[in-house]
Image (spheres, grey):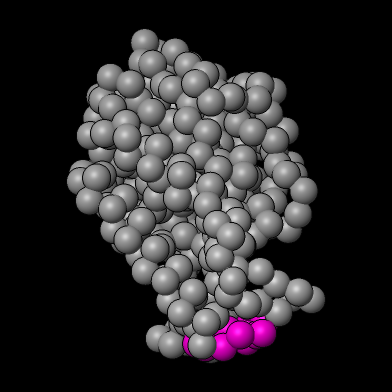
Amino acid sequence: MTAFGPEMAVLTQLAPGVQRLVAPNPSMMTGPGTNTYLFGNNEVAVLDPGPVIDNHLNAIQEVAGARIRWVIVTHTHPDHSPAAAELARQTGAELLGRTAPEGEHQDRTFKPDRVLEDGDRLLVDGAEIEVIHTPGHASNHICLRHVELNWIFTGDHVIDGSTVVINPPDGNMKHYLESLARVQDLRPAALAPGHGELIRDADRAIDWIIDHRLEREAKVAAALKANPGLTSMELVPHVYKDVDKKLYGWAERSLLAHLLKLEDDGTASHKDGRWIRV
Ligand SMILES: [Zn+2]
């Protein structure tokens, strides 16, 4: 590990041609900060440069500088993509990813030179990188698979030690669960998340997330049955008994995502924002 500059950005070599720099944006939502990954040695692809933070942009350039050919983003949330345009401007790199959808919490400064599609393959300094479209946390979310290592770089699809917010309408719980199964089916040797440490037991980590989501869904279904006609916000204390009131706003987003999935499954419906079980 190497430390850079006053903010002490930490560089970790994870595998040959795979390095990680943690952006100095720790918070409740981002854990230790956003992980920026660098693929390649002679020519470099940067994944998720994070928010615009000069020290972090300098650290990325100190590591890879003129060798940066591509800047890729997993999705266009404010903690992942805003530095991409700036880094491309400074290095002439090509911007790759998927366009930001309409709605809140989207970084519209990210405008890809090339829109990545599911199944696209990039050759980065001899390493093959495959694109997996994984909607759920965000509709434009992609994961990247380093084919030789069979590691999957998961952005916010899977993060280390916590669950992510599924915020409708761009976040979609049904798609999220389908995308988790899709990643699990690839039997990855490791998951390299957008926040936190490398996850070596991918299968177990994904099982835990799926179990956790389905448990929560069962709680939502039970709360709905016991309390028909409530709004999603009114249902929060019935489902998230353990959650601090300050977090009810976020809890409501996840709860609504579960309700919309139940509606899609044909077991819940709503009128004027009031939900019942059917
Ligand atoms: Zn995100």
Q: 220 or 53, which is in the foreground?
A: 220
Quarter holding residue 215? bottom left
- In this view, the residue farthest toward the front is 278
Quarter holding residue 224? bottom right
Residue 122 in percent (x, y) is at 48, 16
The residue under the point 53% across, 26% down is 118
Q: 171 or 71, which is in the foreground?
A: 171
Residue 153 in percent (x, y) is at 39, 37
Q: Which residues are magenta?
A: 227-238
Q: Is residue 254 above or below residue 191?
A: below
Placement of the C terminus among the 4 image quadrants: bottom right
Residue 136 in percent (x, y) is at 54, 49
Q: Is residue 231 above or below residue 168?
A: below
Whether residue 246 sits left or right of residue 206 in the image: it is: right
The residue under the point 41% across, 63% down is 213
Residue 170 highlighted magenta (yes or no): no
Q: 251 or 62, which is in the foreground?
A: 251
Whether residue 72 sits left or right of residue 41 in the image: it is: right
Q: Is residue 224 above or below residue 76?
A: below
Residue 233 highlighted magenta (yes or no): yes
Whether residue 201 sits left or right of residue 178 in the image: it is: left
The residue under the point 62% across, 44% down is 139
Q: Is residue 129 visible?
A: yes
Q: 39 or 55, which is in the foreground?
A: 39
Placement of the N terminus among the 4 image quadrants: top left
Residue 44 in percent (x, y) is at 45, 22
The residue under the point 34% across, 48% down is 10
